[in-house]
Image: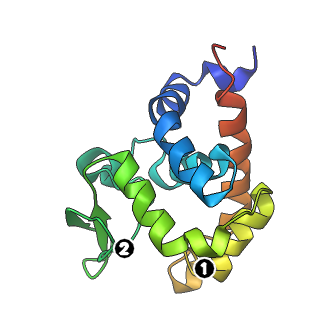
Amino acid sequence: MHKACNVDYAVLFVATHLKDAKIVADRLHIPTENLLGLAAHECEHGRNRFAKDGNGFFSMRAPAEFQTGSLTALKDPKVKVATFGSFRMAAESFAKKYGPGVYGIRDAGEFSKKLIQLRFNSGNSRDGGMDGWARKVELAIDMVRVRMQCGS
């Protein structure tokens, strides 16, 4: 068994959201792990405040399609993050906004780099993004791919 399978909260996140992620990913013709890995990275496997308090698994800013409300970022009160009724609705919102841009991109590195081009995250901390974001998402996708096999 791979050591990634020993991180219980991460394995549980993948198992819990795998079915819904697959439905949306299949429609976008991308691997399920790309969508689920992005979500895992953005919401810290469901442990960050946006995920816990508002199903904001993709950290998408409000307003967003299908949102039910918003949460204010603690570090910047001007930033509102969209909340959703479920993981599925958050994924559908992501698909509506970014799906056409990532449609058919199977490679994890290309997927994360394309999201920077689409301004999902700038990849630069000087303008509110995260330095090295694309590589971090790519690594998260790799870990989700492994965790999809845990327990099977």
Whether residue 73 is visible, yes or no, is: no
Quarter assignment of residue 16: top left
Q: Give the colour scheme shown.
A: rainbow
The residue lying toward the viewer, choosing from 128 and 139, is: 139
Tag count: 2
Q: From what the image shows, is residue 32 above or below residue 3? A: below
**Position of residue 35 in the picture relative to residue 96 (left or right):** right
Question: Which residue matches tag 1?
Answer: 122
Dividing the image into 4 quarters, which one contains the C terminus? top right
Quadrant into which the N terminus falls: top right
- Residue located farthest toward the front when viewing the structure as drawn: 27
Would you identify the image quadrant in which residue 22 lies? Answer: top right
Please state if 138 lies on the left or on the right of 79 as rendered. right
Residue at point 34% right, 49% down?
A: 51
Q: Nearer the viewer, mark 1 or mark 2?
A: 2
Instruction: Look at 57% across and 68% down and name the residue there.
Output: 99
- Cα distance between the residues tagged 1 and 2: 14 Å
